[in-house]
Image (cartoon, helix red, strand yellow):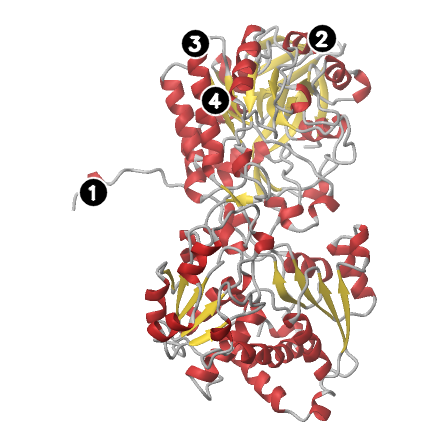
Amino acid sequence: MTAILIRGGHLIDPAAGVDALKDILLKDGRVAEISGPGKLKSTNGAEVLDATGLTVAPGLIDMHVHLREPGQGYKETIATGTAAAAAGGFTAVAAMPNTIPVNDSPETTRWMLAPERNAAIRVFPIAAATRGSKGEAINDYAALKSAGAVAVTDDGHPILKDNIMRETLAAAARVGLSVIQHAEDTRMTQGASMNAGAMAFKLGLRGMPTEAESGLVERDIRLVTELRDTRVHLHVAHTSTAAALAAVRQARRSGLRVTCEVAPHHFLLTEEHVGHYNTNAKMNPPLRSAADRDAMIEAILDGVVDAIATDHAPHAVHEKEVEFEHAPNGITGLETALGLCVRWLHREWKMPLGRVLSLLSAQPAALLNLKGRGTLTAGSFADVVIFDPKTEWAYNARDTKSKSRNTPFDGWMMQGKVRWTISEGRVAYGREG
Amino acid sequence: MNSAATPTRRQLHPPPALASPFPYHPGSLLSASDLSLDGVSHILNRATILENADPLVRDRILAKRRLALLFYESSTRTRTSFELAAKGLGADTTLVSSLSSSIEKGESLKDTGLTLRALGAEAIILRHNSSGAAWLLEAETRLPVLNAGDGMHEHPTQALLDLRTILAHLRPGVEAVDAETLAGVTITIVGDIQHSRVARSNMLLLPRMGARVLLCGPKELLPELAAQVGPGISIERDFDAALRQSQAVMMLRIQAERLAGLQLDLEQYKANYQLTGPRLAAHAPTALVMHPGPIIRGLEVTSGVADGVQSVILEQVKNGVAIRMAVVERALTASPDGGRA
């Protein structure tokens, strides 16, 4: 395998406490050496990347994406989804199991990981918590874990029955897997297509109350409390309400292992962005009120939020060109996450760049227990993103590497442009400087 | 002043929501809130002129122009009055309804709209069971679209014909409206507000002329946040108290087709909200009784009230034709550079 020498860049590796000019030598898919600028001799045959003026950081990790394979290759494939991820600076994505068939078996998990899928970066499948994600019978977590699954969830089909959720939490804990819950009491959201409130009333749409999210988070935290097993890890997916965050905050104070992620659209947009029935502003959980959105920002800045995850959910153009109530939920997000986080969290709200990057790499790596990722120290995987932190640019959805372009951020200004993405020592994405 | 008592908050300036993503056709009428008061005055004025015009002269205004009526829901009043209005101006109309068309075979709204445009339709009048459908149709076809009712959202021509009816009785002779035209007037809308597009359009239109809109109904059909739709709207759950303040009362049908599993005690509902002769005589003996139809006699109103002297229900129907003539004329004559009337 070839070697890569990254020269002259500013390395920000929050997990290792590094924030300085460094040269990095990558070899055989791993980080071979890190040294002060100019000290590493270019080894024979090593490709040299000039990162002068650029930021070098651990490759980004998105713990919540929908790659649509198997079953819905017209929306996205593992190849196209990971190509979009690489363009966005990601070197690893965790793929949700709501595929067709549902990824509830070691066979499907292995199928997703097969070389024939042509993934541009590393894919970590998250397996279904219950058979067919029907919330009735839990799967064999040990078998799924050995096939490659890194967590379990019934994303999109939340586990409502207390006994099944309790069993899921306990069984996952025994094999060292986290349980990720899409918190939505679906009994309260039948036929609803946006956040409940004055805006939904005005638009004549049925609304999803915030309690449908926070109520289920509170129920899950109660179950974690009752289990009294420190191995239990509950992770709340795409948190969107102030009340759910408050419950997570409280659970953490009580010493429980309860973590959460927030998606860029939930800390940037509100229900107002639905505007005149923009189906690219329709997702689940929905865009909420300004108060909820502000609570997301506060919680990110305060450190309550453990990870930024995009909930990348591609849908074909024809699926979104329909009546708002009939449009499927979800937006793409892999190519806009870094640019939005740097633009808003770092530049606008003054979050140190290292903390922003940590939410996008080191912390999700820790949540999913991805060893040797999310940091760049000698011996860790050669997963690297190299980007210009100052460049401002407008995102054009037509240029996407995803098969779909259902994003509300088309035309938005981004800050921070990816120059190279290196996945396990290979350049997975590169752009002329 | 103790400023230390104010909790300090970080200054967050998140990106604002964008305004309308595409320019509407100036001939479109999607929402009652799209119209300026000058635009409303123009429509009221044209309605009167067209209503009184010689039919043989009138039918040259839009002679041989093509209009499509695209109806995904059944309708008597709206469909017929739009059709009569268009034909009264000489236009050719064609009706496409969801039954007996390719919509049954799964053709999308976008494709149906594009097909109608290719067939020569110059404007589309849309009745649809999904809120927001008219915006989608306009975005995809870029034709003038007249919203003839979209889901639980809006029914702007109904609000205009209701306004014409109210003005005829309470402000006779007035056609140019301004922010004070209905100052001092209280209009109560009663019943299934939650599912009513008529209520939403009236709530958006009437307060802009100074009217006070009272909403009345049980919590299941009238959530508190309905009052937040716009200024000049408040909730009065006591029907008798609302009637005592009203110069006009609009009764709404309970929309069984949109209740989505909601259980309602109809006997209780009638006891609290049915407009009966004695109730009307006791609390609002001079108020106009309005109803957008269809009426379910014996439920929201008694037969006696529907047929009574205070009822202007059939006047509303008649005004629908005049208003829709003005709106159809506007659809096909508005110039794209003239902005919205």
In-image side of B30 versus A207 (left or right): right
On the image, numbered disc 2 is attached to which residue? A28
Report crowding for label 1: few under 14, some 14 to 19, many 20 or more residues within 10 A (C-alpha): few
Q: Where is mark 1, residue-wise? A: B3
Looking at the image, is B279 positioned above or below residue A179? below
Q: Image quadrant of residue A332?
A: top right
Q: Is residue A271 above or below residue A307?
A: below
| Gap between marks 4 and 2 measured at Cα | 43 Å
Mark 4 vs mark 2: in front: 4
Q: Which residue is mark 3?
A: A228
Q: Is residue A404 above or below residue A60?
A: below
Q: CA distance from mark 1 to mark 4?
A: 40 Å
Secondary structure beneath label 2 = loop
- Residue A305 in view of the camera: yes
Number of residues whose C-alpha sits closer than 10 Å to that of mark 2, classed few (under 14), some (14–19) or many (20 or more): some
The disc label shown at residue A370, or none: none
- Residues tagged 1 and 4 counted as in contact (Cβ below 8 A): no
Q: Residue at x 46, y 89 (%)?
A: B173
Mark 3 vs mark 2, CA separation in Å: 43 Å
Q: Are marks 4 and 3 on the same chain?
A: yes
